[in-house]
Amino acid sequence: MNPRSDIPLIDLAVQHASIRDEIDAAIAGVIDSSNFILGDEVTSFEREFARYCGCPLAVGCASGSDAILLALMACGVGPGDEVICPSYSFFATASAISRLGARPVFADIASPSYDMDPNHARALALSCTRLRAILTVDLFGQVSSIDAFLRLSQDFQVPLIEDAAQSVGARDSQEQRAGSRATIGCFSLYPSKNLGAMGDAGILTTASAELAQRLRELRVHGARSQYLHSAVGINSRLDALHAAVLRVKLPHLDSWTKTRRENAAYYDRGFTAAGAGTADASLDRTALSLLIPSARPAPAEHVYHQYVIRVPAKRRDDLSAHLRRQGIETAVYYPIGLHEQPCFATLGSDRASLPNTEIATRQALALPVHPGLQRSQLDRVLQEVVGFFREAH
């Protein structure tokens, strides 16, 4: 049996305790209304979320995975098409493409960031014969190189879909919120996300009234009106109970994000003082065998859905096991690239073409950074991580 995690990767109990009365009242209101699917709560949340993101329109759905699928469907992706996406991502990124009969074309990430490399993506686009969309992913709480991908989208005349599942509230180099500039932005509202529901939930953003209407139809089996279907869609409706809870949480999001950023900065200072390097340094040239995460300069804002360090591949699992023994929970995002997944073996991806992805899967480790952490807990994480590497010497 694993020891208890005194410092969990995320602690929803702390978050919910602070707003429990608001949540209880919101849930009671939905129960009293007996309107559980879509309805006024969902419409209100969509409007409030769109305003928060600085995007004209938002459409709720059942999950972040469905959000990607719906976005691809709305953009006309189908059998035989190609969609460029990163290999270093959660499985839903590529599974949605494959489910529609299209082919995910895997791009490497840029180093030292975890973003899909725009240059590699452009080279892949030139080799595609049926490119239908570009799907970029904002990993760990930072908007990807959106300006470069918007140019790529325009140059190849295909839509840009932004998987912003981990970046709600983040700002890009133009100070715009995640999901506000792509053709469609896709958000997961899974409980562990920075803005999370009480179960699976998702939402999409777009500036196009036509696409928003298309998404609304696709989420209800493609129905334009009851029993009249303009397309074959799916059943992916946002529940009113989730929307009500999300409406309670949304006004608190910026405060929670501020604490996440403060926790990340505290880690940065502590690790740097101990001899860690910045993300663009070399692990074998740092006093402490650790690289802190990269963050783009202001006005961009990282929301630290995860605080992901880099450590030597041969020490990563040992470090994770050591921290677990000390009651500190960690996670590996992601232990394998999508191009290596058995279900995509027939795509014939060349591992040698994705070197940065291969390295990240062996070196990356996420540490607790959630807003419920106390300063003493941050100090314990710093002490145990630093001590692990110093004892090795």
Image (spheres, grey):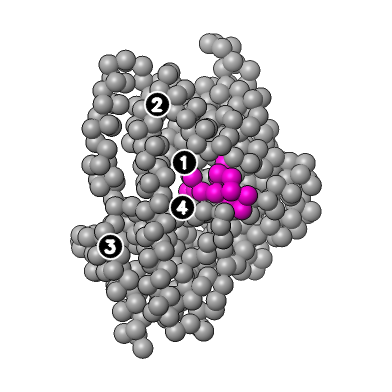
Q: Residue at x 46, y 69 (%)?
A: 292
* Main secondary-structure element of the magenta-colored stretch: loop
Q: Residue sitting at 51 percent across and 83 percent down?
A: 284
User: Few, some or many C-alpha atoms within 10 Å of disc 1 (few <14, some 14-19, many ≥20)?
Assistant: many
Q: Which residue is mark 4?
A: 303
Q: Nearer the viewer, mark 4 or mark 2?
A: 4
Q: Answer whether residue 380 is magenta in the image.
A: no
User: Viewed as shown, does residue 231 lie left or right of 379?
Assistant: right
In the image, residue 201 sits, relative to residue 134, either above or below, namely above
- For label 4, count other residues whose C-alpha is less than 10 Å away and answer few (under 14), some (14-19) or many (20+): many
Mark 3 crowdedness (10 Å alpha carbons): few <14, some 14-19, many ≥20:
few
Residue at label 1?
Answer: 188
Q: Nearer the viewer, residue 17 or 74?
A: 17
Of the numbered discs 3 and 1, the one sitting upstream in the chain is: 1
Q: CA distance from mark 3 to mark 1?
A: 29 Å
Give residue 272's quadrant in the image.
bottom left
- Which residue occupies the extreme front position in the image? 299
The residue to which callout 3 is attached is 375
Q: Kindly tell me whether residue 307 is visible in this rendering.
A: yes
Foreground of the two, 250 or 87: 250
Label 1 to label 2, Cα distance in Å? 14 Å
- Give, as a single range, the part of the protein colored magenta: 166-179
Q: Is residue 23 above or below residue 223?
A: below
- Residue visible at 30% across and 61% down in the picture: 329
- Dot 1 or dot 2, earlier in sequence: 1
